[in-house]
Image (tube, rainbow, N blue to C red):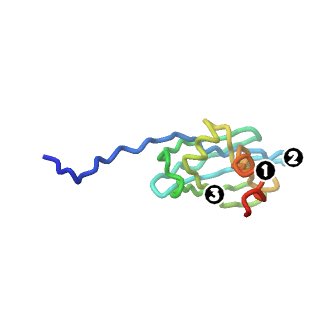
Amino acid sequence: MVSSNTVALKEPDYVNMNVTIRNAMTGLIRPEIVYRCQSKRKDYGWHRSKKPGMQFSFPIILIKGENKIPAIHICNVRSVLGTATLVIENTYLDAEMCPKSSCAHVATPKGIVFRGLEWDFKPCFPNSNQLST
């Protein structure tokens, strides 16, 4: 018998997303990059992209509606120019803005940049002067 004070907990909905690392090391004699990504629970191993345009994607699962606790992945990237540590934080909002592998972290000779959609609050708040009283 269930008392009237109990609350039935609902299973959370999940969203799938791919984290993509792309090689864009153009203009170098050796444009190869080597990288390893890992989270608290999973190690995705070392991967090699020998020439520009090559990429690696790994799937992650995010809880829909949970935007306060991101999924954190740390990637170590190596090239002839040096090494870099990339910290990637994703929430379900990122999964909605970047379907499949449409967004990527791109390794260039100048550094690692994010290519994809980012939040733009101008449509929500077109003129903040109207809010003042």
Viewer-side residue, 6 vs 113:
6
CA gap between label 2 and label 3 equals: 22 Å
Q: Quick one: label 2 or label 3, which is nearer the N terminus? A: 2
Q: Looking at the image, which residue is at 68% across and 44% down?
A: 104
* Mark 2 surroundings: few (<14), some (14-19) or many (≥20) residues within 10 A: few
The answer to which of marks 1 and 2 sits earlier in the sequence is 2
Label 1: how many Cα within 10 Å (few below 14, some 14–19, many 20+): some
Q: Badge 2 is on which residue?
A: 27
Residue extending furthest toward the right: 27
Q: Nearer the viewer, residue 124 or 98?
A: 124
Q: Amino acid at mark 3?
A: Asn
| Separation of marks 1 and 2 at Cα, in angstroms | 10 Å
Q: Quadrant of the C terminus?
A: bottom right
In the image: residue 9, left or right of residue 111: left
Callout 2 amino acid? Gly
Quarter where residue 89 is shown:
bottom right
**Which amino acid does the dot numbered 1 rest on?**
Thr
Label 3, residues with CA under 10 Å away: few <14, some 14-19, many ≥20: some
Query: Counting residues from the N terminus, which is met first, the one under dot 1 or under dot 3?
Result: 3
Q: Which mark is residue 108?
A: 1
Q: Are marks 2 and 3 in contact (CB under 8 Å)?
A: no
Say which mark, if any, is on residue 76. 3
